[in-house]
Image (tube, rainbow, N blue to C red):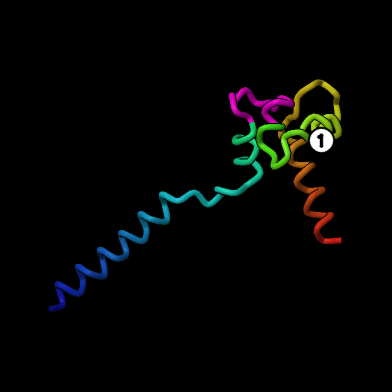
Amino acid sequence: MKILLKTVVTTALVTTLFACSTTSPTSNTKKDRFSKVDANSDGRVTVEEFSSSIRKPKNGPKRFSRLDVDKNGYLNRAELEAERKNKKNKKKN
């Protein structure tokens, strides 16, 4: 009986540890959002990539030009993160 109990407890522990190690703790982070928006994974987001990733794609070019602080025609990670921070601040106020 003790052996069976030890086996069950050990199996449960191993299963739990395995499940925890295979899930991504950063599945909703800004980094992941940037990776999702950057469709071709070149490290920069075009207006087309940005527009296709938002709820109202027709507003994409206008929002993109506002976010493209350095006006190089691409959004980098910092520019996209700044948008997320601004949204959070607006929700708080």
Where's residue 88, x and y in %?
78, 54
Image quadrant in which the C terminus is located: bottom right
Image quadrant in which the N terminus is located: bottom left
User: Residue type at mark 1?
Assistant: Arg
Where's residue 14, x and y in %?
30, 59
Where's residue 87, x and y in %?
79, 50
In this picture, residue 17 sits left or right of residue 36: left
Q: Report the residue marked by disc 1.
A: 63
Where's residue 22, x and y in %?
41, 49
Q: Residue drawn 74% across and 26% down?
A: 47
**Residue 67 or residue 81, whichever sits in front:** 67
Q: Residue drawn 80% across and 58% down?
A: 91
Tell me where the magenta segment starts and ends, as one range.
38-50
**Residue 22 or residue 40, whichever sits in front:** 40
* Vertical relation: 61 (above or below) 29: above
* Vertical relation: 24 (above or below) 71: below
Disc 1 is placed on an element classified as helix
* Number of numbered discs: 1
Could you tell me what secondary structure mostly forms the magenta stretch?
A: loop
In this picture, residue 17 sits left or right of residue 63: left
Dividing the picture into quadrants, the one containing residue 50 is top right
